[in-house]
Structure formats: structure tokens, C-alpha cells
Amino acid sequence: MTATAARLSELLRPAVAATGYDLEDLTVSAAGKRSVIRVVVDRDGGVGLDEVADVSRALGASLDALDEAEPGLLGPSYVLEVSSPGVDRPLTAARHWRRNVTRLVLATLVDGSTLTGRVVSVDDEVVVLDVDGAERSLPHADLVRGAVQIEFSRKATAFDDQEDDA
């Protein structure tokens, strides 16, 4: 019997947190006789390749210990893949919005409407977007999701100065 994604998420979340990251997603799928465990991690400031390697080592050690404690839980063998979320990851939690301050986003609201604006600030209650030069505060409860918009030739803005200071 192999572990479910929910069970592995519960077991691995502390190991991810100990490395200073958030466990954003975990999936388990079959690939022949192997299980493929895909883990997505993130944190404020982003995740680089060296950090992904650090998290991968920590999770590998946790999975090895789990496999020793509960033989067969992970199947006959497994492959661990650790990555950071891509730009196409939906913004659904306050931390996702916060990690995209200064980015242009398409926000989908609970009433089904959408609006495009630049994320100005985020707290536990609201997301503030600059929509055509006017700030608009949106409570998290009014947001279904957001999607980062790719800007290939972004014009310099006051937001860029804020990023440089950070």
C-alpha cells in the first residue's frame, strides 16, 4: 500500500517548514512500479536552485526515515521531485499575493468579474491593486484567484524603486 498525497503532506510539512519554506503542493503518482512524489515549495523572496536542492535533501532524509519506520508505505521505490511554483501558479492565499507585490495580475472576483492591476500591497485582510492609476482594495473574501501576467517589456515604475530598496 502506498501513502496518499494528503498523508505525505501531513508527514512532510514539518520537514519543509524546518528548512524555512512553505509546502505549496504535493502529489503522488504511479510511474510503472515506482511512485513519483512531486513537491512544490515556496517562500518570501522566492526559491533558487540551491535552495531546492537543500529542501530535496531534507525531504529525502525524511522519506528514507519514513520508509524505514513503515516499510511499503512509499511502495517498492519512489522518485522525489522538488520544485518551486511556476509563474502560472494561481494566487489563492494571502502569501501568494504578498509574494507578487509589484507584479501585474489578473484578479478573478467572486461575482465572476475580472480586473487587471498591479499588486501594491497585501495584508491578512486585503489586496491593494493599482488599476489604471487608482488604488482598489479587495478583501481576500472577494477574490477567487489571481494570475500573474507576463510582461516582456515592462515600463519602469515607482514600484521598481521599491523593489530595489527591498
Image (cartoon, rainbow, N blue to C red):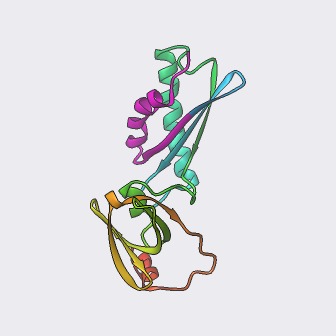
- The image shows residue 79, relative to residue 17, as above or below, that is above
Q: Position of residue 155 (x, y in %)?
A: 55, 85
- Residue 111 image offset from top left, x and y in percent: 40, 61
Assign the C terminus to one quadrant of the image: bottom left
Q: Quadrant of residue 82?
A: top right
- Measuring 46% from the left and 16% from the top, which residue is drawn there? 69
Question: Is 26 contained in the magenta span?
Answer: yes
Give 55 or 89, whichever is nearer the viewer: 89
Q: How many marks?
A: 0
Q: Which residues are magenta?
A: 1-27
Identified at 64% across, 22% down, the residue is 77
Q: Is residue 83 left or right of residue 122?
A: right
Find out whether residue 58 is within the magenta segment.
Answer: no
**Frontmost residue, 67 versus 61:** 67
Identify the residue at the far front of this view: 111
Give the camera-side residue of 67 and 112: 112
> Is the N terminus in the top left, top right, bottom left or bottom right quadrant?
top right
